[in-house]
Image: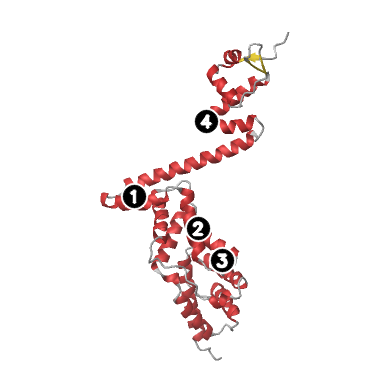
């Protein structure tokens, strides 16, 4: 007669898994009991052998019992478990790399600097919370009149994600971002374009065009100059204010943007830190601001020159 059930001892002998462990699996619901003997002892069916092999393979990867239970009971697939566990491992690796970079930053500095670094680096050891601190800050500080898409873009630029494999300098830069936003005297984001805001999102659509052109010029190392980027910038403001693009309007706009918070040294430092954290993938807005302001000044000089008569 073909055997259809096995005792826990027979399973232990056949699989090499201790009886105590199998009993734990059984009590946890990982190894269902098929029946009971006349003496009340547990008996297990044919599926127990494959289930034990699967459990052992997953446990060899340090997979939590709770996650294994979901797979063997059909609550989730093996593929879903692998994806979830891979994400958990990636998060752990990021935390370890972040800790390693933090310790290197503390090790590679003079003793008098170490306590200062320790104070600011302690702010950014809980990575998800550290990122939320930045996003919450800028979500509060940026104008609520901005279109949501523009607001989301700006918050994302100003609140970079912690890098997964940071260098010591990157961790320090990320900590300095938190130090700045927690400084009471840190310049808040000021709104210098109230008139333009009334025509948003049309205003921001044209500003985006100017930003793309400016970013291209800055990335190519081109000096500030009159041209398409400046013209697009002026056009956005002129349309929003229902003014013609004249030398007088350009002079007015130049005065407006020259007073902007874009030239505040602390905000400029903030953008520089963002560049360090992101590896330069985010355009330094103060650099772009200065480039456009100087380009606008050059364009004013060009329009002020008398035309030659032929």
Mark closer to the observer (3, 2): 2
**Among numbered discs 2 and 4, the one appearing first in the sequence:** 4
- SS of the residue at dot 3? helix
Residues at marks 4 and 1, CA–CA distance in whole angstroms: 33 Å
Of the numbered discs in the image, which one, if any, rests on residue 118?
A: 1
Precedes in sequence: disc 4 or disc 3: 4
Q: Are circles 2 and 4 on residues that touch, CB within 8 Å?
A: no
**At x 53% / y 65%, what residue is drawn?**
216
The local crowd at label 2, few if under 14, some if 14 to 19, many if 20 or more residues have their Cα within 10 Å, is: many
Residue at the extreme top: 1
Q: Determine whether label 3 and label 2 are within 8 Å by CB.
A: no
Above-or-below relation of 230 to 30:
below
Identify which residue, 222 or 100, lies in the foreground: 100
Q: Residue furthest left?
A: 112
Mark pair 3, 2: CA separation: 24 Å
In this rendering, would 129 be left or right of 206?
Answer: left
Measured from the top left, where is residue 171 in percent x and y? 41, 51
Q: Is disc 3 surrounded by few (<14), some (14 to 19) or many (20+) residues within 10 Å?
A: few
Could you say whether the residue bearing mark 4 is in a helix, strand or loop? loop
């Amino acid at each position: 007669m073909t055997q259809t059930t096995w005792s826990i001892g027979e399973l232990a002998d056949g699989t090499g898994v201790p009886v105590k462990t199998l009993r734990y699996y059984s009590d946890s619901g990982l190894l269902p009991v098929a029946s009971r003997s006349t003496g009340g002892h547990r008996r297990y069916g044919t599926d127990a052998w494959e289930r034990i092999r699967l459990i052992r393979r997953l446990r060899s990867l340090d997979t939590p019992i709770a996650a294994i239970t979901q797979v063997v009971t059909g609550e989730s697939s093996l593929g879903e478990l692998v994806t979830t566990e891979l994400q958990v491992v990636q998060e752990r690796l990021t935390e370890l790399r972040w800790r390693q970079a933090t310790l290197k930053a503390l090790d590679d500095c003079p003793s008098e600097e170490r306590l200062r670094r320790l104070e600011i680096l302690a702010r950014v050891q809980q990575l998800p919370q550290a990122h939320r601190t930045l996003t919450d800050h800028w979500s509060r500080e940026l104008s609520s009149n901005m279109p949501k898409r523009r607001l989301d873009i700006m918050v994302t630029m100003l609140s970079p994600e912690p890098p997964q494999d940071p260098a010591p300098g990157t961790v320090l830069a990320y900590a300095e971002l938190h130090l700045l936003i927690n400084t009471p005297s840190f310049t808040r984001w000021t709104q210098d374009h109230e008139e333009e805001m009334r025509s948003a999102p049309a205003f921001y659509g044209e500003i985006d065009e100017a930003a793309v052109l400016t970013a291209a010029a800055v990335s190519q190392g081109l000096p500030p100059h009159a041209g398409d980027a400046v013209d697009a910038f002026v056009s956005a403001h002129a349309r929003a204010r229902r003014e013609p693009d004249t030398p007088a309007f350009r002079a007015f706009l130049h005065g407006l943007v020259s007073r902007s918070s874009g030239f505040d040294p602390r905000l400029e430092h903030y953008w520089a830190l963002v560049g360090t954290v992101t590896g330069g993938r985010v355009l330094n807005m103060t650099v772009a601001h200065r480039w456009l302001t100087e380009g606008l000044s050059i364009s004013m000089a060009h329009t002020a020159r008398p035309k030659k008569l032929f």
